[in-house]
Amino acid sequence: MDRSNIEKIARTDEDRYLLAMLWDKINGGMRKNIISAAGFLSPREQEMAQYLFGNTEGLYSFGGYEGAERRMWVFLPDYLGEDALYDNELSPVVCIRAVFYQNDEPCHRDFLGALMGCGIDRRCVGDICVGKGKCDFFVTREIAPYVLQNFISAGRTKLSLSQIPLAEADLPLPEVKELKDTLASLRLDAVVSAGFRVGRSQAAQYVESGKTSVNGLPEIKPDRQVPEGAKIAVRGLGKIVLKSVNGTTKKGRVSVLIDRYI
C-alpha cells in the first residue's frame, strides 16, 4: 500500500478526495487493528480502490451478498475471519426490507430517489433489489437506524421497514438475454455494436463521447481490445458482458457469446 499512488490513479479532484478518504479510513483501521469500512463504491470507484490497495491482507470487497454491484472496502482485524462480514452484529453492511402493497410497483429509481430525498448520502446506500411487494436494500450500519425511522415511502408507495439478516435477503435474478454473434475483431465498438444491436459507427460515437465504461472504468477509445469476461456499460443503453470468445470461423471472424441485461 502506497498513499502516493493516489496521484497516479485519480483523474479528477473528486477522485483524489475519495481515494484519500478511503486511505485514511482503511489505514486507520489497520493501525488500530479494528473493523473499518468507508461506504459503498460504484464499479469504477472499486477499480480505483483495487489499484490503490492491491491484495492487502485482511482487506475485503463486500456489498452484503455475493455478486453485489455496489461494494465497500472492509478491513477485518487479525482476530476475525471473513465470515464476520455476514455477522449481523459485526458487519458494516445492513440489509433492510421494505414491504409494500403488492399492486403498487415502485421501481429502483423510486427507492433511490426517496432515500436521497431523506438526506442520505449515496455512499451510504448499496444495491437496491426490488421484488413483488417488497424491496431488500443495503445500507451502512451507521445509517441504518435513521433509515428505519425516517424512510416511510418510495414515490407514492407507503413502506413498512424492518432489518433482516444478510443471509435472508431476497435477491431477484437479473434478466439476461444471450446473444451469439461473429465479429471482425474484439474492438470495443464492435462488441458494443453486437451487444446492443446498434450500428458500428453509432457504437463508436457512444464510446468517443465518454458514455462507455469497461469493468467500471471509463473508456473513450473505440479500438480498445475487450477481454473475455469484460463488463461493459453504456449510458442510455444498459449493460452487457462478453461472456465467452469461442475461436474464429472459416472466414476469420471471431465467434462470441454476449449476455445483455434487460
Image: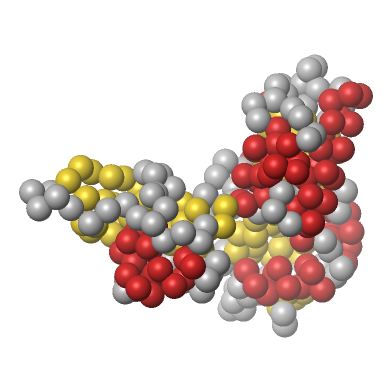
Q: Give the percent coordinates (x, y) of residue 248.
A: 17, 46
Q: Residue at x 79, y 50 (%)?
A: 16
Q: Quadrant of the C terminus?
A: bottom left
69 to 156, vertically: above or below: above
Residue furthest out toward the top: 79
Residue furthest out toward the bottom: 156
Is 95 or 158 nearer to us in this picture? 95
Q: Give the percent coordinates (x, y) of residue 253.
A: 18, 53
Classify residue 81 as left or right of residue 177: right
Classify residue 257 as left or right of residue 82: left
140 to 189, vertically: above or below: above
Q: How is the image coloured?
A: secondary structure
Is 253 or 60 nearer to us in this picture? 253
Q: Give the percent coordinates (x, y) of residue 76.
A: 77, 27
The reply to whether residue 163 is visible in this rendering is: no
Q: Quadrant of the N terminus?
A: top right
Q: Give the percent coordinates (x, y) of residue 223.
A: 39, 57
Q: Residue at x 81, y 38 (%)?
A: 23
The reply to whether residue 183 is visible in this rendering is: yes
Q: Residue at x 74, y 57 (%)?
A: 12
Is 74 or 195 nearer to us in this picture? 195
Residue furthest out toward the left: 250
Q: How many badges with numbers are in the image?
A: 0
Q: Residue at x 23, y 57 (%)?
A: 184
Classify residue 204 as left or right of residue 146: left
